[in-house]
Image (tube, coloured by chain):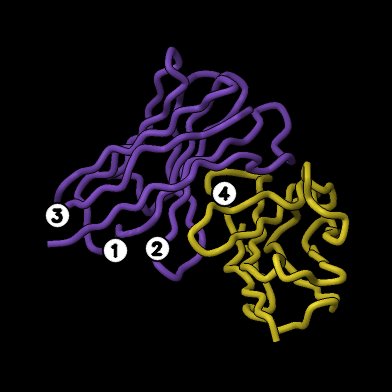
Chain colours: A purple, B yellow
Amino acid sequence: QVQLVQSGAEVKKPGASVTLSCQASGDTLRNYYMHWVRQAPGQGLEWMAVISPSDGRSTYAQNFQDRVTLTRDTSTSTVYLDVSRLTFEDTAVYYCARLYYYDMTTGFDYWGQGTLVTVSS
Amino acid sequence: IQLTQSPSSLSASIGDRVTITCRASQDISGYLAWYQQKPGRAPKLLIYAASTLASGVPSRFSGSGSGTDFTLAISRLQPEDFATYYCQQVKRFPPITFGQGTRLDIK
């Protein structure tokens, strides 16, 4: 059974960095783009970044380009999202989700359970 | 690619049929998905490729459309259907884009 299991909740101060993880079980990352999406309290879904299964290259939304880094460890089927220079506006639930590399019409079929990041002084 | 979803909120009764629309700013062919999200939960895939029901999703959900105009329909509303619904385009990224969401409340 496929599961995307995310790391636990974080509380950070403004200006700090946070690293979130997402581990795939029941399947590997080999055939899937791995995406991150966040949702601020009471708000909609905001796409942040993706890492390609073919070459491990990451691509970012323009809003996050200079302070987000997405990496992977294929040996453990884990992807890592680093967000630096946190501000109060980064308080949100962060989700990982997968998209089948060979047929993107299939949508994000599995999502992680979400990780709440709270930025507070 | 911008997605404009309407309405932003909707009230309906058990047993009603409702429709939600999603308009893309350019042709995305059938690269559209619909998600349902309940409070405190991750989004759940309902429809992919504009009209294909995801595994385990009840047949009262249906999707249609192609190009720029898409519709999600829910017939015979059940109590568990009251949630927020999002459309998403996967034609081209970056960025992946989502509609702003439609909150479906019980009347």
Q: Which amino acid does label 3 sit on?
A: Lys
> Residue A90: where, in percent of width, then height?
30, 58
Q: Identify the subunit bearing mark 1.
A: A
Tell me if mark 2 has few (under 14), some (14-19) or many (20+) residues whose alpha carbon lies within 10 angstroms of its own. some
Q: Are marks 4 and 3 on the same chain?
A: no
Q: Which mark is residue B96?
A: 4
Camera-side mark, 4 or 2: 2
Task: Tell me the CA gap for discs 4 and 2.
Answer: 17 Å
Task: Tell me the CA gap for discs 1 and 2.
Answer: 8 Å
Q: Which amino acid does label 4 sit on?
A: Ile
Tell me if mark 1 has few (under 14), some (14-19) or many (20+) residues whose alpha carbon lies within 10 angstroms of its own. few
Marks 4 and 2 in Cβ contact (< 8 Å): no
The answer to which quarter of the image holds residue A104 is: top right
> Mark 1 = which residue?
A89
Camera-side mark, 1 or 3: 3
Vertical side of B21 occupied by B10: above or below: below
